[in-house]
Image (cartoon, helix red, strand yellow):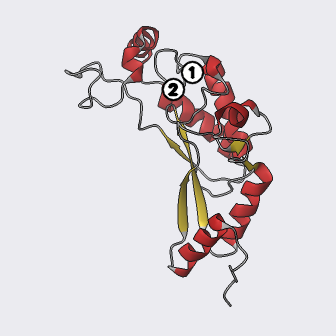
Amino acid sequence: MAVPCCDANLFEWQLCHLACACRNVLHWHILDSSSFPVKSLKFPQLSAKGAYSPAATYSLDELRELVEFAKGRGVRIVVEIEMPGHGSFSAGMPELSLTSCDDVLDPTKDSTYKFLGDFLQEMTTVFTDSLLYLGGDEVGFDPKCKWPGTSKCGYHCFDRDPAVAAWMKTQGSMFRPRVLTVRRKVLTNTKHSI
């Protein structure tokens, strides 16, 4: 039996059409450098200072309703929480961001990983799919790059910040392993699989 979609809002209408077209996964890039639309209860300053406007936000309950709406139509919502860059964390929590590069989390601070653990724990109460995409493809570090700061090397904020570059040379590329450790702990404490 088909589920009627005539009363659905635009997002729900799109989910209905995904289902009608036999598409069963929506990869939702929910955060971006230009907006933080998620109204976190633990970190309300993120959307208060990072969203386009108060009207351009989703409460956690609204997000849960969308996830359930999608499930009812056989569509999985796989959310992407972009990090260390493009996540728009800096508007609401500038103390966790690099000053040398807009909107990039500072990998040298333990407080960054504590925050990410708390934030991801909250998001797993909303987005219940077994997959949780964390991005990680925007910021790089390549000490062998012959053209630092150019598009040939990618977006290398870690190279541009002297303190982070020094840390990366001694620690190696530790952001991803530390975030994956945080993610593993979060997913272990929820019904998500790794």
* Residue for point 59% across, 48% down: 30
Task: Name the amino acid type tagged 1.
Answer: Ser
Q: Position of residue 25 (x, y in %)?
A: 54, 66
Q: Position of residue 79 (x, y in %)?
A: 58, 52
Q: Position of residue 132 (x, y in %)?
A: 58, 49
* Residue for point 77% across, 49% down: 59
Residue 131 seen by the camera: no
**Mark 2 and mark 1: span between their CA atoms?**
5 Å
* Residue nearer the viewer, 76 or 160: 160
Label 1 belongs to which residue?
97
Q: Residues within 10 Å of mark 2 (few under 14, many from 20)?
A: many
Element type at mark 1: loop
Image: 54 above or below 68: above
* Residue nearer the viewer, 180 or 29: 29
* Residue for point 56% across, 76% down: 17
- Residue 139: name its quadrant: top left
